[in-house]
Amino acid sequence: MEWLEIFLNTSFWVAAVRIATPLIFGTLGEVICEKAGVLNLGIEGIMTIGAMVGWMTVYQGAGLWTGVLFAAVCGGIFGLLHAMLTVPLGLSQHVTGIGITLLATSLSSYVYRLILPEVNSPPRIQAFEPLDIPGLSAVPIIGEALFKQTPLTYFAFISVIVVAYVLYRTPVGLAVQMVGENPAAAEAQGLNVTIIRTCAVVCGSAFMAVGGAFLTMSAFNAFFFNMINGRGWICIALVVFASWRPGKALLGALLFAAFDAYQMRLQQLIGSEIPYQIFLMMPYVLSILALIVMSRRVGYPQALMVPYRKGER
Amino acid sequence: MNSSEIDVSKNQSDSEVVLRLRGITKVFGSLVANDDISLELKSGEVLALLGENGAGKTTLMNILFGHYVADSGSVEVFGKNIPEGSPHAAIEAGIGMVHQHFTLADNLSVLDNVMLGTESLWSLSSNRRSGRRHLEELGKRFGLEVQPHVRISELSIGERQRVEILKALYRKARILILDEPTAVLTPQETKDFFETLKKLVKGGLSLIFISHKMQEVLAISDRVAVLRDGSLVTEIKTAAASETELAHAMVGREIELPERKALEAGRSIFKLEDVTVSAGEGRPGLKEVSLNICAKEIVGIAGVSGNGQTALADLISGLAVPQSGIVELHGEIVRRFTPENMLRNKVGRIPEDRHTQGVIGDMSLAENSISECYREAQFSTFGWQNHRNRDRFAENVVSRFDVRGYNSKAPVRLLSGGNMQKLILGRVLSGNPQLILANQPGRGLDVGAVAYVHQQLLSARAEGAAILLISEDLEELLQIADRIAVIHRGQLSETFPRESISIAQLGLLMTGQQNFSTTNYPSAGNNAS
Amino acid sequence: MRLEARTNIPLGFMLLAPVLAVLASFMLCAGLVAWSGVPVLEAYGLLLQGALGSGFALAETLARTTPLIFTGLAAAVAFKSRFWNIGAEGQLYAGALIITVLGTGMLDLPQELMIPVLVICSAVAGALLLLGPVLLKLHFGVDEVVTTLLLNFIVILLVSLLLEGPLKDPMGLGWPQAEPVTEAAELPRLFRGLRLHSGLLLALLLAFIIWIVSIRTTLGYEMRAVGFNQKAARFAGMPVNRVMIMTALISGGIAGIAGYSEVAGMKGNLTLDLSPGFGYTGIVVAMLAQLHPLGVVISATFVASVFVGADAMSRSAGVPSYIADVMVSVSLLCMLVSVLLVRFRIRWS
């Protein structure tokens, strides 16, 4: 019954929430982009550059929050690039997104190597410390998971609530939904489709970058090449799984992370009988399965991947 | 908009000009859509903009509303020039537009659709309560009641149109542009709609009513402006206008109307018995539909769009599979519902949307001409294409069906709508089909092109083809169909011989106000002409 | 700002687009190069020298071109039918894997037979890997971008698993690498002492075949029609699903052959660093060629020279070799824009 006891283990839940954090940021960011009608396949690269920039800022002596801010700004810049190419110019969102990922990833590597030419083992930084919320963190099993995490994790949870509120309750959120559903309608309301879509992509990309920064500033405390390792693509799958809703995105990311944390512990339990690669494959396999299960569900923004060119005929 | 403002505008003198267009010119590529058009709209009047499809009416109004930017000319509203290319500025200036294709977001509620854009985007919450109250007030005053919290996707076409008008009123519009508003309405709904328009005028609005239907223009407008080929050709008071005069101004040339000979219907070609096609994504399918079409006859299907026409067309095109019921072609039961099989069974299909289904816009005319028969031996041997035969075939289609603007290398999307339709007609008729599905074959075409399409359909009929004509235009149906059935919410009425039914009767059937009696169907079906 | 479609585009314009894009990307990357402290012109000079400056350099460049032609063609074929195969990387490894299983002794045939058999086997492996995503797309509507991307990670983990397990070379000093392929399975070198191998000829032949198929055959006609307008193609009675599957099989197959070419022509055995992202770079190659099969050959050569040249530049001047990846990805984005400028006229208002 050891495989069941894992669920009673505090560290398991703590790990699950930690693993979930970058996915929450990434999925939330992608939801914002796609709600406005723009698929952002730049996510993998934007997370990478967020991870690099956040870490590098702190490594160069700045504060942790400055690092997060820089990461977000950098993510926003790449989001702006993606938006400029796909929104007013209406270029293929697939190809542009892949291009953004290639660019952001290679740029991260280049800049890292340029600043640190001769390092073999990646240097570490003094990262975010877990913030204990007294009282609540003492709740057995899940207390520490929810109330003894690093500030970025709390920030992720708060972001979900804020984004959900903005999307469904404020004029700007409704405007985002409308440009993703029927841009011609938005324009007939006197709204500027280009600006709204661009802002949504920039904002979503900033979230993705913060998700990447979490990895170097709250989890591994160092930057490695290829450290995002497909997390961005998993977020794309999670968006579909979440039916484009922020709340469900949170749920999906947590579920996914719990599964990941579980299989890691199971791996320790089983030992080397099953090659570790099988366990490492699990997140990717799971993402594909999630896509298949949710594939028939409707609810995607009607104008997703449809460029809107004003006055075209 | 509140009532005091309306009273003020009401009291202003009738001759005040609220809107002035000066020398509007707009060119798309080689097409002059608007050629130096100057127009005025006076306070409290209904100005009708009459013209054929492609005459430039919609382009003009899109410039007025800021969707397009004119190449030259200016727009003046209440004495002030408005900046170009900004719907926002047009709305601010008091212009409202009801687009032909509604501009509503299906996933949002009526209230959200109406309110969005009226509040600052940066406010942290929206004042929905007062918005709702205001919306309900407006609805009551103009007889445009809708439920504010229902999602757009759940509304009927007529209700959506009401929301569109309310959207403009909510933004304090004082000039309302209505782009072909009756195209989606039944004759009865049109009558109610005209009552609403009269209320709007009484409430102090000035209207521009765009249409290509003469009777409607005569019924509702104070003044008529006629556009032809992008130019303003006539501008007269409606009271002084006659139908023939307007028709001549609109078309500008003699159109030979196709001659329709009475023919004895032949043997049954196509038969539906209690066929049900499931609804796909919110659209109505077909419910136990029965129909019989014989050689040498045209059966028309009337109805407001979105009542199952797409399902019927898809069924015959081979894109939809029936859930139950029997489909017979040439007396044999059809079992495979694929476009390929339909083509093999000599079914020719003229699709509703030329651009998305009819042609592959980025391919050449020659490549498009063989898209339904490219597997035939003359075009392909062991998978190797015979380009010489293909080009010869295309040339044949071009000359036989008078396709103009033909450049063998250029992508076919550059053809005009009429020429594209001729190409599709040519492709369909070259296969000598015995059953022809013509789904809205005249949509968006000018009178000459429509007459040409009708002519071709009639001669196919004379040669023995059975034709199913789906159209929202009752006049078109009464012109060339032998029998007419009405489709409503996926159900098909019995068929009526053209001589025995009027537009008013069809209209009643289209709204579902008359019961659909299917009991006496067989007798009506066999009684072809 | 508005875009207006040009009606008649001269061929010269179309050919100009990639040249413009490449120039723009060199200019945009100049700042990054300068940041490293090396004078820009000198660095670019070294790059050119390193890529094309000598017979050896040229041979290295062409050797690097070979896999890029394969993956570029894989992307071009798929994208032309609007099937977004981003999984050429995984398909390459799938091809390499099957070669390692069959070519290291299990299959014993004379060379004239061995090479064609292995080419086919690697193609089948790559094609089968892409069969899953295309079927999921057609039957469940699952987006192929995500599935092919995720499959890349899965396949590479599988390779890692096998290289540490059953396929591990006992003579490999503990490194995760497979046994070298037999002599009969090897793709012969074209010149003594150079790494350039006959895989290049195979790639050129394939590019030519794909071009002919695309413009002269019924299948090519169907594939283009499906890519341009799937709805109209289906309405016209074309077997859209079958065409999609064929496209995927061809695309995956070509990427699989890249795996064979790399293992049997270049490296000799399968390792985890067999491909430094050839699959992803293939997308850039295809886009620079505007999806034209023959254009792929030219753009692959260009991209390969950037990589080989940047390596040389890195060795002699110390500019990190990652600059090559940056330049290539920048040129992809520039290419998208310059094609747009060729197709449309921008009107400012």
Image: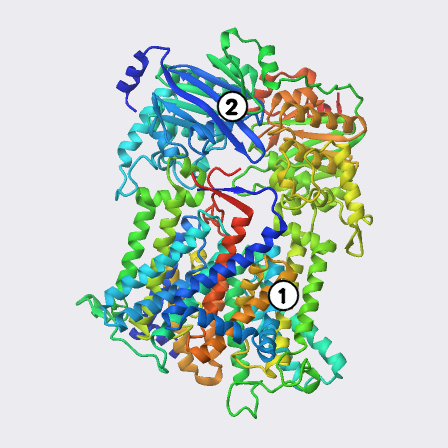
Give the labeled residue for mark 1. C297
Give the labeled residue for mark 2. B182
Please indicate, yes or no, whether residue B274 appears anywhere in the rendered image: yes
Q: Using the image, name the chain to which the residue with label 2 belongs.
A: B
Choose top left, top right, bottom left or bottom right for residue B52: top right
Q: CA distance from mark 2 to mark 1?
A: 57 Å
Q: Which one is nearer the viewer's eye here, B155 or C72?
A: C72
Amino acid carrying mark 2 in the image: Thr
Position of the N terminus of chain C, as image quadrant, is top left
Q: Position of residue A165 (x, y in %)?
A: 30, 49
Mark 2 crowdedness (10 Å alpha carbons): few <14, some 14-19, many ≥20: many
Q: Which one is nearer the viewer's eye here, C211 or C230?
A: C211
Q: How is the image coloured?
A: rainbow
The image's mark for residue B297 is: none
Residue sticking out furthest to the top: B240
Q: Which element carries disc 2, helix, strand or loop?
A: helix
Mark 1 crowdedness (10 Å alpha carbons): few <14, some 14-19, many ≥20: many
Q: Position of residue A47 (x, y in %)?
A: 38, 64
Q: Position of residue B84 (x, y in %)?
A: 40, 32
Q: Nearer the viewer, mark 2 or mark 1?
A: 1
Q: Residue at x 37, y 45 (%)?
A: A195
